[in-house]
Image: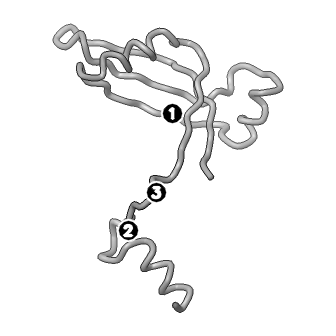
Amino acid sequence: MGVRARFYVSSIKKTAYDKESAQVELIATTRRKGVDNEGFWDYTPAGNLQMSLSAKGGAAAKWFEERLGQDVYLDFSEIPGQNYRDPHSEKSVEEIEASQKGT
């Protein structure tokens, strides 16, 4: 199971010294009221994401440029087979959860 959020492409910034790379900002969709948007407002009323896209990501930068000011979905899902580690512990998250359950 994953999580889906609705964001809009707020801005795309490029610099004179590196015209192929871009800074993209996405902001949670709250500005347009509508049946579909109201459901997202209930769960993600605020949020933003800033990404740096390198020159190698030119196709990605173009994709966002074409959608400037439009809503897009932002999907989050777990990566199967990952052994996540708590940054404050030597144990993996799975080991910590197992020890808390007493197994």
Figure check: 25 above or below 47: above
- Closest to the observer, 45 or 56: 56
What SS does tag 2 mark?
Answer: loop
Mark 3 vs mark 2: which is more N-terminal?
A: 3
Residue beneath disc 2:
86
Q: Residue placed at 41% from the left, 31% from the top? A: 50
Whole-number angstrom distance, CA of label 1 to CA of label 3: 26 Å
Residue beneath disc 1:
48
Q: Residues within 10 Å of mark 2 (few under 14, many from 20)?
A: few
**Which residue is at the far bottom?**
102
Residue beneath disc 3:
80
Figure check: 65 above or below 88: above
Q: Are marks 1 and 3 in contact (CB under 8 Å)?
A: no
Whole-number angstrom distance, CA of label 1 to CA of label 2: 24 Å
Specify whether 4 is left or right of 11: right
Figure check: 66 above or below 77: above
Mark 1 vs mark 2: which is more N-terminal?
A: 1
Residue 88 place in picture, x, y as percent? 33, 70
Mark 1 vs mark 3: which is more N-terminal?
A: 1
